[in-house]
Image (cartoon, rainbow, N blue to C red):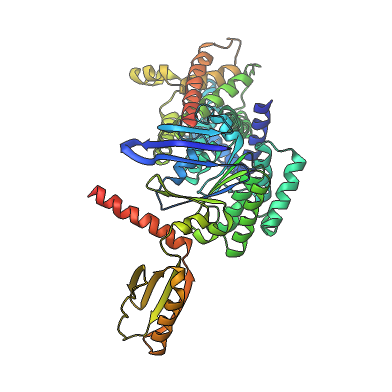
Amino acid sequence: MRWLRSYLLLLRWHAIRLKFILPLMLVIQTLLAVGIVVGFSFLMPEVDKATALYLATGAPTLGLITVGMVLAPQMIAQSKTEGTFEYNRTLPVPRTAILAADVTTWLLTSLPGLALALLTATLRFDLDLDVSPLVVPAILLVALTATGLGYAVAYAVPPAVASLISQVIVFIALMFSPINFPADRLPGWLQAVHEVLPFQYMADAIRDTLAAGGNGVSGLPFAVLAVWCVAGLALTLRVMTRRS
Amino acid sequence: MLLQIDHLTKIYQRDVRANDDLSLHVAEGEVLGLLGHNGAGKTTLLNQVAGLVKPTEGTIRIDGRDPVADPAFARQVCSLQLQAQAPLTGVTPRQAIDILGRIRGGSRQQVKERSEQLMSALDITEWADTPGEKLSGGIRRLTAFCMAVVEPGLLVMLDEPTNDVDPVRRRLMWEQVRKLATDGCAVIIVTHNVTEAERSVDRLVVLDHGRVAATGTPAELRRQASSDLRLELTLTPGAAVPEAPAWASSTNVTDQRMVISIASADAPQAIAWAQQLHAAEGVAQFVLNPISLEDIYVGLTNTSEENHDAVAA
């Protein structure tokens, strides 16, 4: 009960503080989605059905990755510099409530952009999506994993390093991850790396549930993401509760 | 005793001794002023009480319970105003104070009333709905003070709360600090403003290099000083520096200023001596003042600075 009360109040506190950057988030995510859907099709003169599906489902995935692993850690880095992190440590609320409220805020922030990205893609490619009800847990898990990992980075390293790492992450995700294209186009060693990294599984989870196509939804991406997610959140919580 | 600290030692990495065998206590309804130079260990002390930093040795008891073993309890009963500014970007003082009051456990109505009353007592209602990034440093500091005391809990700890605040509102803030004590809170206030502290605190603890250099009421600290008056002479330019009289317990000359510490019993002859010099135009003017707590404080920490250096050498 006390946990829930703390959680809801913290959520309100975040909402007030973040309301002025929310429109900016929407613009960034929309531009990103349009950039991927429209821009990538300039690179590829012939867009067949399969490519279109990758681009259309890759765009919202990248949107979630950008919010969770780039924008959220950058805001954390900024809040550490401003002293918000230290201030929150003094509040009489459970640490898990602080983390949960933070993560919820970022999930909610990324949803409108996700919808816009999907809309742009379907309009551009005239796709027939076959949406599974599992899309809801898939989106939540991808967003939660991205945010959890983004947080772990932001809390574990100094602000300047965190900003740098988040830049590298978005670069790898955009260009060198099988999100917008099938994994078999990558060299063997990079494919092997992506067997472990979460990016491919994020893309798979979203694509499978948006366009199941009668093949059913694979459980593997969910399992791998769950492991990354728990690891990210556990590390974050550890840093938050650490006492010098 | 609401807060009881015994033999507290905190050693950070690289052998930095922030607190060194430090003992103090604060009762309900008492305001304790914590004085000390930068790096004397004041903030480290507050952070340990609030359960944010673990002591190396010694014990802390808040209302009989241990904040080290139960940091959640410590955060529940302590309100801490940090030395750094509170995060107010995008938030108005009213929103910030209301939410913090609710987070600290107050009911909606109760917090609303208390926050209006605090803002009006500190005369900041005018800025109640201005976003934080547009507020001056002083108003932000006062807002942070309200955020800490809107639901004060048992123990309120304020780390340099009067920084950046104008003299009029500083007085208003001290009144609120006093009121917190009257309402039954124990208050610890870290400050560099010795003169203000002297007027408003019940007891003072002077920290020096992590140790308690002196403790007592302002009056008791004064009594510890060897003399209780100071005669300050402004010398006439070009005139010779007068020889220190026999009744002077210490004499200090800098440029055109001569400061002599004396016991109150010697006041009549000191005035006569100064008047004589003044008549002979050896001094341009003179003043006789009670020795200030600040002088005592500087004396306390300076002496130990020298000792410390001697030990280090």
In the rendering, at what x and y percent does residue B29 appear?
63, 45
* Residue placed most toward the observer, B4 or A27: B4
Name the residue at the front extreme: B265
In the rendering, at what x and y percent does residue B126 appear?
69, 59
Q: Residue at x 55, y 56 (%)?
A: B162
* Residue placed most toward the observer, A122 or B312: B312
Name the residue at the right extreme: B109
Q: Is residue B109 above or below residue A177?
A: below
- Residue A32 vs residue B105: left or right? left
Q: Residue at x 36, y 36 (%)?
A: B11
- Residue A173 vs residue A121: left or right? left
Q: Is residue B137 above or below residue A241?
A: below
Q: Can you tell which quarter of the image residue B138 is in?
A: bottom right
Q: How many marks?
A: 0
In the rendering, at what x and y percent does residue A2 appear?
67, 28
In the rendering, at what x and y percent does residue B31 appear?
58, 49
* Residue placed most toward the observer, A111 or B214: B214
Q: Can you tell which quarter of the image residue B227 is in?
A: bottom left
Q: Is residue A186 above or below residue A95?
A: above
- Asked if residue B172 shows in the view, the reply is yes
Q: Quadrant of the N terminus of chain B?
A: top right
- Residue B226 vs residue A217: left or right? left
Q: Can you tell which quarter of the image residue B172 is in?
A: bottom right
Name the residue at the left extreme: B313
Q: Residue at x 41, y 52 (%)?
A: B38
